[in-house]
Amino acid sequence: MLKKLALVIMLIAPMSIFAQKFGYFKSEAIIPVMPEYAKSQNDIEALRKQYEDEIKRASDEFSKKFAAFQKEQKSLPQNILERRQKELQDLQEKAMQFQQDAQQQLEKAYRDMMTPIYEKMEKAAKTVSKAGGYTMVFDMNRTDIPYVDEAQVKDITNDIKTNMGISLTAAPYVPQTPAPAAPVAPVK
């Protein structure tokens, strides 16, 4: 009797393993069509432009002071020459430090803006997964899975988009390229 019970359990156990449902989605097909993503990219671009403008202003200031220094350096007394060299060196170091700080601030701003976007997508993925009875769902763009048999695993990307209220025909965000500047007429 015990042998028959063990045999029945051994036959039923593999069936429960095969009854599991697996799914996957592609975040790179979802994120770029989210309205929040377009806004975050525009905000990041505006911040990047502000930093670029400030870096250019500092670079122009350094170039102007360096050019003036080069013109005057032969006529300056040694102590003034050394002071100006130190000023230029300090200016250059501050500019380099600002550039590093700006890069770090941009990276932090990007992370801060993208975190709620990923959280919203993941929440929708969980909702769709639970509603569909999936045991496991993978993001193919953020998980290193070398092979997926698409006949055995369902792509739920469109289900997630629908759950988030995103049209299946929505176009992904494309950054706007600035229009070329119009040539400036010379002043007469």
Image (spheres, rainbow, N blue to C red):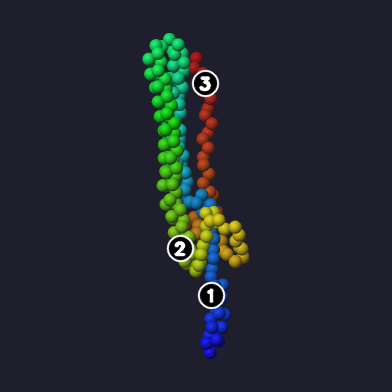
Q: Of the two numbered discs 3 and 2 on the same chain, state the one appearing first in sequence.
A: 2
- Label 1 vs label 2: CA separation? 23 Å
What is the three-letter code of the residue carrying label 1?
Ser
Q: Say which of marks 3 and 2 sits in front.
A: 2
Q: Which residue is mark 3?
A: 185
Disc number placed over residue 127 in the picture, else none: 2
Q: Nearer the viewer, residue 51 or 85?
A: 85
Q: Which residue is mark 1?
A: 16
- Label 3 vs label 2: CA separation? 60 Å
Q: Are marks 1 and 3 in contact (CB under 8 Å)?
A: no
For mark 2, give the secondary structure: helix
Total marks placed = 3
Q: Nearer the viewer, residue 153 or 42?
A: 153
The x and y percentages for residue 126 are 46, 62
**In which quadrant of the rendered view does residue 119 lie?**
bottom left
The x and y percentages for residue 137 are 51, 62
